[in-house]
Image: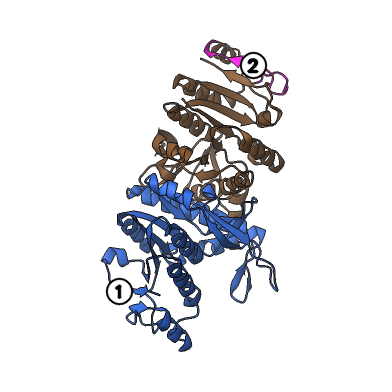
Chain colours: A brown, B blue
Amino acid sequence: MEKLTVIKIGGNIINDEVALNQFLIDFSKVEGKKILVHGGGKIATEVSKKLGVKTEMHEGRRITSKANLDVVVQIYAGLINKNVVAKLQQEGCNAIGLTGADGNSILATKRPVKEVDFGFVGDVTAINTKSIHTLLSGEMTPVFCAITHNKEGQLLNTNADTIASTIAAGMSDLYETELVYCFEKNGVLTDVNDDNSVIPIIDSAKYEELKKEQIIHEGMLPKMENCFDALQKNVSKVIIGNANMFQNNSNVYTTLTL
Amino acid sequence: MEKLTVIKIGGNIINDEVALNQFLIDFSKVEGKKILVHGGGKIATEVSKKLGVKTEMHEGRRITSKANLDVVVQIYAGLINKNVVAKLQQEGCNAIGLTGADGNSILATKRPVKEVDFGFVGDVTAINTKSIHTLLSGEMTPVFCAITHNKEGQLLNTNADTIASTIAAGMSDLYETELVYCFEKNGVLTDVNDDNSVIPIIDSAKYEELKKEQIIHEGMLPKMENCFDALQKNVSKVIIGNANMFQNNSNVYTTLTL
């Protein structure tokens, strides 16, 4: 099978213009077929403030009102996604920027209301591998932002980590797929304040151990769940590391295995 | 050659939610391969005001500052384009929303500074027929907003009428291409206030005559130039008419011929 690399960059890289530009130069040089998934960053919050749109939270999680959704669609699918695409085109990478609605590539369902109504938040239900394969075959590099749709006309705000792992899992039917989570740290750390404390390999047993010992930082848990989920769905390799790893050809990062 | 229909809808349809929804239902039913190009509408101006971004004009034409560009990218490529795509997907049309940067599909050059610096405004220089053909062959319907790029990392605000005619002209190498301009009037009118005064056919001679008699409304002139330009570049048919023409299967519109 042909190789495919799915790379996700976090919001903190999006927020840092210098780091983002360098990453995009590096990404454009990654060989073979590839897909980029990007997070949102703080611009949406800043624009919301200026527009007088309130950001409501519940236990640290954002509630997406209609007004919030409009802002994140503008910023994620508009401002960020299109500037990323333009920059990649400059670097000779034939990028095409997408939400899950485009080519019906990522279907989601509005999160059911239980104790809390999270509003226009989507949980991914299916990846349209045919659409994505058409673009890859046409020598294009899909660049996904974290917006999906429900095929009933509704756009939905969706977790970018989950989008990346679900795309990687779906595409592994057609490609030997590798999933790379890039952020501002060097990998999964035993000490969150020490960037030299990277754990090189984490398998399922080690993961259980790290959870029991509460070594893994709380925010890292959902990301790790996404990683193991992808591995279970035949993604061949999952890596967590620094966005500059491609530049340095670094081997300092965390590899996850089953 | 296979048929292709390029349809452009104007900003006044974008501004009218009911008319837009009905148009998108009708568009989704148009048979054969098709491309939608949409204008901007007034939302960008409204959001600019809220964000405190000034809109500068020169002789009725907008000057696009960096702050203006950010807003139009957000609104045209983000809010409007993605909601149009989601709605078309609901109607069973496999839409994919694009700027000219996506798939490097529309190249433009920043308008040269003469007496006036129009800022980040692009003049179209080339259409990437290969990219657009890849999408059409993959059973997708491209939906373009009026943003292009210069392949040097810069997004550019571009006239939607020109985008539509340039796409139609470019694609007529590969398809028997028809170009339809849809707006809120029934066609080219002899009396701008009388929607029953549609001129059914305008050829080059008639156009010269109408210009001489100053019957054609000033705002219509650049649109007409785009139409004749497309016809000269082998577009098989150009129509100007009401956005509801598909719904009514109407034959009240203006057909342009050389």
Which residue is outermost to the bottom? B213
Instruction: Indicate which label's residue lies in the foreground, 1 or 2.
Output: 1
Q: Position of residue B99 (x, y in %)?
A: 52, 53
In front of the other: A191 or B30: B30
Q: Is residue A222 magenta?
A: no
Mark 1 vs mark 2, CA separation in Å: 70 Å
Q: Residue at x 48, y 29 (%)?
A: A168
Give the magenta-colored segment's residue range. Answer: A189-205
| Quadrant of the snapshot with the N terminus of chain B | bottom left
| Helix, strand or loop for disc 1 | loop
In the image, what residue type sits under mark 1? Val
Res B24 quadrant in image: bottom left
- Does residue A215 appear left or right of residue A158 in this picture? right
For the stretch drawn in magenta, what is the main secondary structure? Answer: loop
Residue B140 in view: no
Q: Would you name the residue on which mark 1 appears? A: B252
**Dot label at residue B63:** none
Chain to which mark 2 belongs: A
- Residue tagged 2: A200
Pointer 1 local density, CA inside 10 Å: few below 14, some 14–19, many at least 20: some
Q: Are marks 1 and 2 in contact (CB under 8 Å)?
A: no
In-front residue for pair A159/A136:
A136
Q: Amino acid at mark 2?
A: Pro
Which image quarter holds the C terminus of chain B? bottom left
Vertical placement of residue B179 versus A114, above or below: below
Instruction: Bin the neighbour count of mark 2 within 10 Å (Cα to Cα): few under 14, some 14-19, many 20 and up.
Output: some
Q: Is residue B104 above or below residue B64?
A: above
The image shows residue A196 at horizontal and vertical percentages of 73, 20
Image point (47%, 49%), residue name: B130
